[in-house]
Image (spheres, helix red, strand yellow):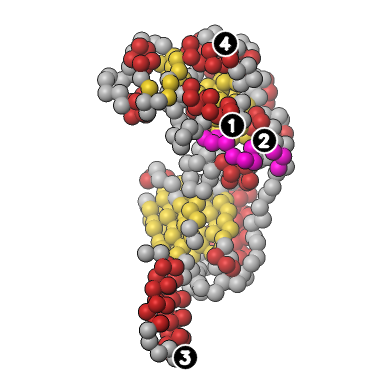
Amino acid sequence: MTKSTFKYLLVLFFIGYQVNAHTIEAFHLYTDQVLNEELVLNSHSFNTHQRSTFSYSSQVEALERGLTIVHLQANNKIEYKTFDTYGSEHDVVDFITILTQMINAEASIAILAHDSAAAKLARFQKELKTLGLPQLSSLKGRQAYVMHNLNGQIFEQVDDNSIRIQISAPSAITDNTIYFPREVYEFEGNIDRYIAHAGGEINGVKSTNSKHALDENYKKGFRFFELDIIETSDGKLVAAHDWSMWARFTDYTGALPPTHAQFIKQKIYGDYTTLDMDGINTWFKNHPDATLITDKVNDPIAFANTFVDKDRLIMELFSVMAVEKASENGIHTMISQEPLMAIKGDKVNFLKVNNVKYAAVSRRIISSQKKLMLQLREAGVKVFVFNVNFDAGKDEQYVYDNELGLVYGMYADKWIADMGSKN
C-alpha cells in the first residue's frame, strides 16, 4: 500500500463519523507521523564489494568512493555531493568546510561512506571532533560509516562491513539553501557523441549485438556503433557480449563456446540475426557513414586487418601494450579505464605521444576524477562514459542533462529526443 493510498483510506474512515476539532488534530498528527518521507542509508565498506546507496522520496542514488553528504531540503528535495576523502586531501578540506557551514546552519543532513573513506582524514581529527563527529574522526580504512542529524542531534555508527539505516525525515523542512550548485558544461550536439551500446536497444532488449539492432538504431540517428567481439571455439571472431548471455538469448544448450557454424545458425530471441565478421563487414560496407567501436578484443592489428575500413574503426583497448601497438600501426584507439588510470605520471602526455584521441570510463568515476576529465577535454581527448542505465535514474537523459560537456559522449542503449540537438 502506498502512502497516498493509506492517507486516502484514513480519510474515508473518518467520513462516517462526527468530526470535531480534536479528531482533525489527531488525524493530522497521526498522518504526519506515519507519512513522513523515509531516508534509507546503505553504507558498504570496500570488503563487501557492494555499492553504497541512499534513497529518499522515490530517488535512489548509488555512490562513489569516499564520504557523501546528503542535504534534505524543503518540498522533499535533496542535494548531495561525494568527496573523495580516500584519495584527495583537498576533498577533505572542502568536506569539512561545507559540513561546518551546514552544521552551524542546523541543516538536515546525513553522511555515509562508500568503499574506503578514511585515508586522508587522519590529519583532521581535531576538526571532526569539534564538529561533534568523534566516530568519523577515528574511522579506520575500509569501514562503513553513517551519520545523520535529522532529529536535532547527531547520530553516528561504524561497522567493519555494512550499515543500513531507515529514518523518517522531519515533516516541516523549510531549508532551501543550496550548498552544492549544479555544474553545467556547454557542448555542441554533435552526432558522434553517442555510441549505440552493443548495437543499441531493439524492442526493449539490450546487448543483442545483432544486425537488427544496427539497422534499427541507424534509422534512429546513431552513427557510432559498439560491438562486443569474442571468439568461437574454432577461433572465428563474432559479435556477442559473452557466451552465457548469448546462450540465454538464443536458447542454445550445447557446449560453450559454440563453433562458428553453430553460432551462425542461432537467432536471438528467434528473430534477430547474429553477426560474424562477414556480416559485420557487409553491414558497415553498406553504411559508409557508420563507425565501429570494438569491445572485448585486445589485439588491434589482427582485428584491424579483418575489418572493411580501418579509417572507420575505433578500438577500445585494455592494456598499455595494446595501445602502443595500435599507435605504431595507425589504428584509432580508445583507451579503456583500467590502463588509463594505471598510467604513472602525466596521463595526458602519454595519450598525446601515442596519438590516442578517445577514452572510455565508467560514469561512476567522473565526479571523483573531475580534474582528469577537464584535462582530457582541454587536450582534445574525447571521453565516453559507460555504465549508463546501471544505476537507478542514471539513464541517457540524466547523462545528457548532467554529465555531457564534462565528458564528450556516452555509450547509450537507446536514442533520446535531445540527442543531436544543441544543449
Identify residue type, mark 4.
Val
Give the residue type that dot 2 points to. Gly
The residue wearing badge 4 is 308
Q: Where is residue 386 shown, x and y percent of the image?
A: 53, 35
Image x and y of residue 114, in percent: 47, 50
Residue 94, picture quadrant: bottom right
For the point 39% across and 57% down, the residue is 163
User: Which sits in the foreground, 168 or 350?
Assistant: 168
Q: Quadrant of the C terminus?
A: top right
Residue labelled with disc 3: 21
Q: Is residue 275 left or right of residue 220?
A: left
Question: What span is colored magenta in the figure?
Answer: 412-423
Measured Cα–Cα span from mark 4 to mark 2: 27 Å
Q: How many angstroms separate mark 1 from mark 3 (CA)?
A: 60 Å
The reply to whether discs 1 and 2 touch (Cβ–Cβ < 8 Å) is: no
Which residue is painted at 43% across and 85% down in the image? 26
Which residue is tagged 1?
Answer: 220
Cα distance in 3D space between marks 1 and 4:
24 Å
> Which comes sooner in the sequence, label 4 or label 3?
3
Q: Earlier in the sequence, mark 1 or mark 3?
A: 3
Q: Is residue 106 magenta?
A: no
Q: Earlier in the sequence, mark 1 or mark 4?
A: 1
